[in-house]
Image: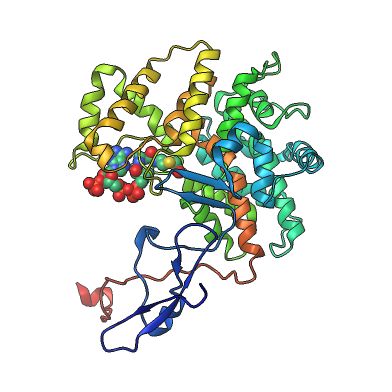
Amino acid sequence: MADKKATLHIEGQAPVDMPIMDGTIGPEVIDVRKLGTSGYFTFDPGFLATASCESQITYIDGDKGVLLHRGFPIDQLANNADYLEVCYILLNGQAPSREEYEAFKDIVTRHTMVHEQISSFFHGFRRDAHPMAVMCGVVGALAAFYHDSLDVSNDEHREIAAFRLLSKMPTLSAMCYKYSIGQPFIYPRNDLTYAENFLHMMFANPCEEYEVNPVVARAMDKIFTLHADHEQNASTSTVRLAGSSGANPFACIAAGIASLWGPAHGGANEACLRMLEEIGSLDNIDEYVEKAKDKDDPFRLMGFGHRVYKNYDPRATVMREACHEVLKELNIKDPLLDVAMELERIALSDEYFVSKKLYPNVDFYSGIILKAIGIPVSMFTVIFALSRTVGWIAHWSEMHSDPNNRIGRPRQLYTGEELREFKPLHERE
Ligand code: CMC
């Protein structure tokens, strides 16, 4: 395939040959790097037709609804592995042996405590601050707490940063919640699994232990797994771009958290639940579906549609099952679930959604599970950030281990003023 090329003909110029690169699976890509030397750039706002990097971590076929991590299908991982196993796979490229898995789990488990001074840092925030605002701040602040092992070109240093982030994210996330409700922070427990420990730090208090329900812990673990990575999405691309300058790893992850916060990305699970609450009852669904279809109305059905998936989001299939399992186990009859199911039914059969291939995405169901577990809506995106941290680190580390890595520096199509003379203020009066 090495000789396959695309040729660009620009009027009045010699043709430009561009090599075509092929991956293991997925579409071939035209290597446009040489184009810059011809004085032309490609124009692709939103990166609809641009592969920003080469990667071996995650593969998505949006038309077929396929998601693979290091080659393994997401449903197999979600049903047969736990989150830390998936983290190992994302970071190391292959499934761990039992020994490797136990060693990995042991390191993560033993580094969950955060520097005690971080609790004072939390106290600088208002109690009513959005937890994502707090997360942007405290995760960025880790750069001020963990100064050693910051040589991004050193594999071992990157691994230390990875373990620190993976271990401490649940602790910091739970601290955000505890701070917002005025309860004392709960220390992690090394005898619990990753998901159980997070639930413990969220819901235990000094007067009462939290008894972890295994169905809830399993659902929590699945939520972590299903959000672990998703190729070059906005937040991952943000982490890569921030990291490409050699920036501090904790600062890069804070940048990813900031990007994730938006309602078109990780903020969708929160927006979706708020939308379901706003719709309120089955009687109002038609009105909201009409609003979503109205071109003059900015309203969109949150939890529907995806930039890459033009088929059922494979994560949504697993999440839907987990959602029903949790509601049954906790014996919850949630009217919001009735609204959600009816919305799903209508959207899947309505010509507007069918023709635009707008299927429910992962956030459509995750919010309902989180609500059933007792997690407040404002914490939903924090949990997404916690889960996605491993994906961000895997991509950040992959980028730094690539000898061809260069600082990310997109160009632009300039449509502003041409050269003009600046006159001092007194001459413009
Ligand atoms: N409700 C109603 N119409 C929609 C929706 C929606 N949720 N999503 C897309 N459309 C329409 C849109 O109006 C456009 O119509 P037209 O072609 O007539 O102008 C068409 O579908 C294509 O939409 P787009 O905005 O060009 O697509 P995009 O790839 O730029 O946006 C998206 C993808 C996820 C931002 C968008 O579908 C959306 O806003 N969905 C709701 C928010 C959401 O659930 N986000 C979570 C994504 S999954 C979690 C994650 O990975 O972060």
Q: Is residue 247 visible?
A: no
Please determine whether, in this image, residue 338 is positioned above or below residue 36.
above
Residue at 48 percent of width and 63 percent of height: 52
Q: Nearer the viewer, residue 102 or 170?
A: 102
Q: Residue 340: x and y, percent?
A: 36, 24
Please determine whether, in this image, residue 140 is positioned above or below residue 283.
below
Q: Nearer the viewer, residue 38 or 322?
A: 322
Q: Nearer the viewer, residue 210 or 139?
A: 210
Residue at 65 percent of width and 57 percent of height: 397
Is 102 displayed left or right of 361 in the figure? right
Residue at 36 percent of width and 45 percent of height: 310
Q: Where on the picture, by quarter, is residue 43?
A: bottom left
Q: Count all numbered tags in the image, as a single digit.
A: 0
Is 24 displayed left or right of 204 in the figure? left
Figure quadrant, ligand 1: top left
Question: What colouring method underlies this structural image?
Answer: rainbow
Please determine whether, in this image, residue 428 is positioned above or below residue 168.
below
Q: Residue 192: x and y, percent?
A: 74, 26
Q: Is residue 113 visible?
A: yes
Q: Residue 410: x and y, percent?
A: 44, 68
Q: Where on the picture, by quarter, is residue 245?
A: bottom right
Q: Nearer the viewer, residue 176 or 377?
A: 377
Q: Residue furthest front?
A: 1
Q: Residue 13: x and y, percent?
A: 31, 88
Q: Quadrant of the C terminus?
A: bottom left
